């Protein structure tokens, strides 16, 4: 089940009421339900404001509550990519085994959309939330509210507020170091890193591993070869093209994710360069297409389905009352195919 958001009409939300009264969303929610935890005066204030601001409870949420289902909300940045679809598969299968339904929503890599999705999940009274940050999220207030309300939440992939929320991440630093070392071992020396926004912890981990490999091999770090920008196919295509048109161009590229990997692959081909003889390439991607393009892509693959089941298991633990904060790491796997070795490693 997928949750859609429209920016055309703004429906008054619990968050709007809470902001107007300078109280928490939890207080507003309880007051509207006439909870005995909230004093009569506050209940009256909330109900009067709700009427004034034309607040209407989500009828879908109301009908769901009558049936008392157990629902988990999942928000991801880009549902059409193989990685997020595979994580969602893992979450759904694990949730189903435990008797839960899943509602998923796409933030489209946009912080405002992500915040609206979280608001919708609160209105739907989900039992818990699994989330991966959008690339534009630098304000975490909507997640701070979730923490204050005591709604269980687990992050995967891209995370924040690590002292408050459990998370499932990959060992991107180690994997990037291993991949960069492989490129060095097979003849590459000017290795570029094309990443995403620098504030994302996932970008930081992968870039760190890349830089560590260069340091360990005493290869000078050339900042011109490190480009971290928006996660977008055209932006990555342009960035790769600029790198390849440099007088002293890179002879290898480590690409942050599948979108950037395939943009780099295309740019190399467009410049009439051979892979890997002129420019070697390794990408972070578990997309099946990595094995089907020519030449077949060497890739650092996430165990994305396992990330989904692990995140859901943690969430279920929290729903059952466990308040510990867990940090789980699901290791990535370096799959060597045809795009990375300028020369075959000596046996």
Image (cartoon, rainbow, N blue to C red):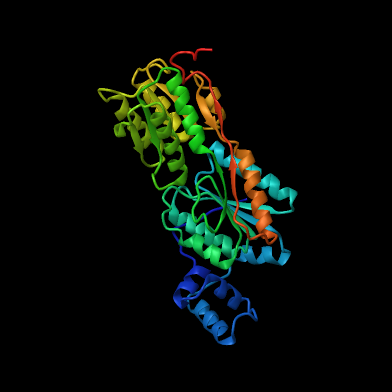
Q: Nearer the viewer, residue 190 or 125?
A: 190
* Residue for point 56% across, 56% down: 165
**Quadrant, the C terminus:** top right
Q: Position of residue 24 (x, y in %)?
A: 52, 72
* Residue for point 42% across, 58% down: 139
Q: Position of residue 187 (x, y in %)?
A: 41, 17
Q: Position of residue 281 (x, y in %)?
A: 44, 24
Mark yes or no: residue 307 visible: yes
In this rendering, the answer to whether 102 lies above or below 230 is: below
In the rendered view, does 184 fall on the left or right side of 71?
A: left
In the rendered view, does 336 fall on the left or right side of 274?
A: right
Q: Residue placed farthest to the left in the image?
A: 247
In this rendering, the answer to whether 296 lies above or below 257 is: above
* Residue for point 59% across, 38% down: 304
Q: Quadrant of residue 306?
A: top right
Q: Residue placed farthest to the bottom in the image?
A: 41
Marker count (numbered):
0
In this rendering, the answer to whether 53 lies above or below 328 is: below
* Residue for point 28% across, 24% down: 245
In this rendering, the answer to whether 319 lies above or below 285 is: below
Q: Nearer the viewer, residue 169 or 214?
A: 214
Q: Quadrant of residue 121?
A: bottom right
Mark yes or no: residue 13 visible: no
Q: Position of residue 200 (x, y in %)?
A: 44, 46
């Amino acid at each position: 089940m997928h949750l859609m958001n429209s920016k055309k009409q703004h429906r008054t939300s619990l968050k709007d009421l809470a902001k107007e009264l300078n109280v928490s969303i939890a207080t507003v929610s309880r007051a509207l339900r006439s909870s005995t935890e909230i004093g009569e005066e506050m209940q009256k204030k909330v109900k009067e404001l709700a009427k004034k601001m034309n607040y209407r409870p989500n009828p879908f949420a109301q009908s769901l509550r009558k049936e008392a289902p157990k629902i988990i909300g999942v928000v991801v940045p880009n549902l059409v990519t193989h990685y997020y679809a595979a994580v969602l598969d893992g979450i759904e299968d694990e949730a189903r085994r435990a008797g839960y339904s899943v509602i998923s929503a796409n933030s489209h890599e946009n912080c405002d959309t992500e915040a609206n999705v979280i608001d919708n999940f609160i209105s739907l009274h989900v039992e818990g939330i699994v989330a991966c940050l959008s690339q534009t999220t630098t304000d975490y207030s909507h997640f701070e509210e979730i923490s204050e309300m005591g709604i269980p939440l687990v992050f995967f992939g891209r995370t924040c507020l690590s002292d408050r929320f459990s998370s499932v991440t990959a060992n991107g630093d180690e994997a990037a170091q291993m991949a960069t070392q492989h490129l060095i071992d097979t003849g590459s020396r000017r290795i570029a890193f094309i990443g995403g926004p620098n504030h994302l912890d996932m970008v930081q981990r992968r870039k760190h591993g890349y830089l560590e490999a260069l340091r360990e091999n005493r290869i000078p770090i050339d900042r011109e070869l490190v480009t971290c920008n928006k996660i977008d196919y055209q932006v990555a295509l342009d960035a790769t093209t600029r790198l390849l048109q440099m007088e002293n161009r890179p002879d290898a590229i480590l690409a942050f994710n599948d979108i950037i990997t395939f943009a780099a692959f295309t740019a190399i081909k467009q410049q009439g360069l051979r892979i890997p003889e002129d420019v070697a390439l390794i990408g972070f991607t578990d997309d099946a297409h990595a094995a089907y393009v020519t030449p077949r892509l060497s890739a650092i693959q996430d165990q994305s389905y396992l990330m989904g089941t692990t995140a859901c298991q943690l969430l279920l633990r929290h729903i059952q009352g466990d308040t510990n904060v867990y940090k789980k790491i699901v290791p990535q796997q370096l799959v060597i195919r045809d795009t990375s070795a300028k020369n075959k490693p000596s046996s």
